[in-house]
Amino acid sequence: MKVRNSLKSLRGRDRDNRLVRRKGRVYVINKVKRRFKARQG
């Protein structure tokens, strides 16, 4: 999982990426290709 300042570029890498907010943190998750994961905060 990558920890990044900006998740907008990572979200655009795959069309199945979703931006999710959990417990005050922002995550990029992908149910299909699970290697696309990132966290902010």
Image (spheres, rainbow, N blue to C red):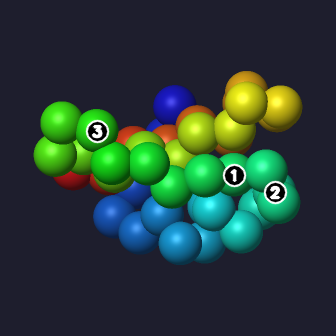
Nearer the viewer's eye, disc 2 or disc 3? 3
User: For the residue carrying disc 1, how many other residues have a C-alpha within 10 Å: few (<14), some (14-19), or many (20+)?
Assistant: many
Residue type (three-letter) at the residue carrying disc 3: Arg
Q: Which residue is mark 1?
A: 17
Residue carrying label 2: 14
In the image, taking residue 12 as reference, residue 39 lies left or right, namely left
The reply, left or right, for residue 17 in relation to residue 8 is: right
Q: Residues within 10 Å of mark 2 (few under 14, many from 20)?
A: few
Of residues 32 and 36, the one drawn nearer to the viewer in this rendering: 32
Report if the CB atoms under discs 1 and 2 are less than 8 Å apart.
yes
Q: Residue at x 60, y 71 (%)?
A: 9
Q: Residue at x 61, y 52 (%)?
A: 18
* Badge 1 or badge 3: first in the primary sequence: 1
Label 2 to label 3: alpha-carbon separation: 21 Å
Residue 7 on image: x %, y %: 48, 63
**SS of the residue under disc 3:** strand
- Residue 41 is left or right of residue 18, and the answer is left
Secondary structure beneath disc 1? loop
**Residue flagged by tag 1: what amino acid is it?**
Asn
How much space separates mark 1 and mark 2, taking CA atoms? 6 Å
User: Measuring 69% from the left and 38% from the top, which residue is drawn there?
Assistant: 30
Please count the marks in the image: 3
Taking the image as drawn, is residue 41 in sight? Answer: yes
x then y, percent, for residue 39: 39, 43
Marks 1 and 3 sit apart, C-alpha to C-alpha, by: 16 Å
Q: Earlier in the sequence, mark 2 or mark 3?
A: 2
Q: Say if 41 sits above or below 23 in the image.
A: below
On the image, numbered disc 3 is attached to which residue? 22
> Could you tell me residue 41's position as x and y percent?
21, 50
Seen in the picture, residue 38 relative to 18 is either above or below; the reply is above
The residue at 28%/38% (across/down) is 22
